[in-house]
Amino acid sequence: MRLITVLNRCFKFNRFVFESINFDEINRIIVSVKPRKNSKPECRVCGRFSSTYDTLCEPRMFEFIPIWGFSIFFMYKMRRVSCAVCGVRVESVPWHMGNNRRHRLTWDF
Ligand SMILES: [Zn+2]
């Protein structure tokens, strides 16, 4: 059974898909997450869904629940949303409390 299957059983995010899973050079499990096709990003400030303004170049890492002693990180390139009310804002993602950039843990962790 693949780890993606396990993740999909436990943590289904409607607007995102688990794309691939790999070990990095220091034996962390890196789960690449991407937005589901045609999903609109959610404004971090007001919660409205709007069109994508752009996608940040550098992926962000979010620490997830470790498994069998391995650290697990979600890796995701944040989109910026073009919100009619708030302007251009970084999107909100369901696995992370968006207000604190330095806080890297996922909700589930
Ligand atoms: Zn907004």
Image (tube, rainbow, N blue to C red):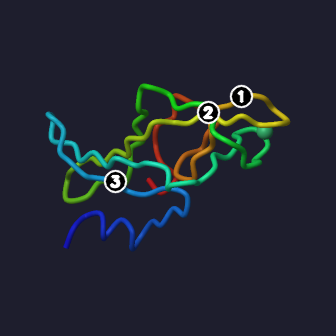
Question: Which quadrant is the N terminus positioned in?
Answer: bottom left
Q: Report the amino acid beneath label 2.
A: Arg
The answer to which of 26 and 79 lies nearer the viewer is 79
- Viewed as shown, does residue 19 lie left or right of 93? left
Q: CA distance from mark 1 to mark 2?
A: 6 Å
Percent of width and height locating residue 52: 63, 38
Q: CA distance from mark 2 to mark 3?
A: 20 Å
The answer to which of 100 and 94 lies nearer the viewer is 94
Which residue is painted at 34% across and 53% down in the image?
Answer: 19
Mark 3 sits on what residue? 19
Mark 1 sits on what residue? 88
- Viewed as shown, does residue 66 lie left or right of 15? left
- Give the answer, above or below, for where 61 lies relative to 8: above
Q: Report the amino acid beneath label 3.
A: Glu
Percent of width and height locating residue 82: 71, 34
Mark 2 sits on what residue? 80
Element at label 1:
strand
